[in-house]
Amino acid sequence: MLSSEARLPIGEPRRYLGQLCKHFQHKLPVTLEETHGCITFPGGVCTLKAPADARMLTLRLVAGDEAALGTLEDVVGRHLKRFAFREDPELHWTRAAGQSSH
């Protein structure tokens, strides 16, 4: 399995965690708690964390191959940027050691 992570300093991380999970729950399996969530895509899984005491949203993607991981980075990134357009977030994905970057 390949993985990628982005840590995004943002004003209201739990708000965006909730928006992403609620958006995708109409078509995909989703779990949502106050400070974390999980979205299961056909090509992989996105876990989200927004600790109550931090202004940080952490997104972690896991997929079976390079193409699926790149697609997840694109889909999750585009949706987050659309929801957080007022903050214009800079999202940078970091691949686990030994993996190329998208």
Image (tube, rainbow, N blue to C red):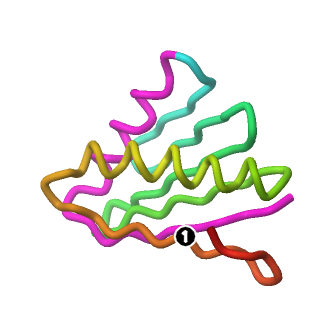
For residue 43, which quarter of the picture?
Answer: top right
Q: Residue sitting at 54 percent across and 70 percent down? A: 93
Q: Is residue 87 above or below residue 68?
A: below
Q: Residue sitting at 56 percent across and 32 percent down? A: 31
Of 70 and 84, nearer the camera is 70
For residue 56, which quarter of the picture?
Answer: bottom left
> Circle 1 — which element?
loop
Q: Is residue 40 left or right of residue 1?
A: left
Quarter containing the C terminus: bottom right
The mark tally for this picture is 1
Q: What x and y, as percent, mark residue 70?
A: 66, 55
- Which span is picked out in magenta? 1-26
Residue at the left extreme? 86
Q: Is residue 83 above or below residue 22?
A: below
Magenta region includes residue 19: yes
Check disc 1: other Cα within 10 Å, few if <14, some if 14-19, many if 20+: many
Magenta region includes residue 3: yes
Q: Residue sitting at 26 percent across and 65 percent down? A: 10
Q: What x and y, as percent, mark residue 47?
A: 59, 50
Q: What x and y, as percent, mark residue 45?
A: 68, 44
| Residue type, numbered disc 1 | Trp
Of 37 and 67, nearer the camera is 67
Residue at the bottom extreme? 97
Q: Residue sitting at 60 percent across and 23 percent down? A: 28
Q: Is residue 81 left or right of residue 49?
A: left
Quarter containing the N terminus: bottom right
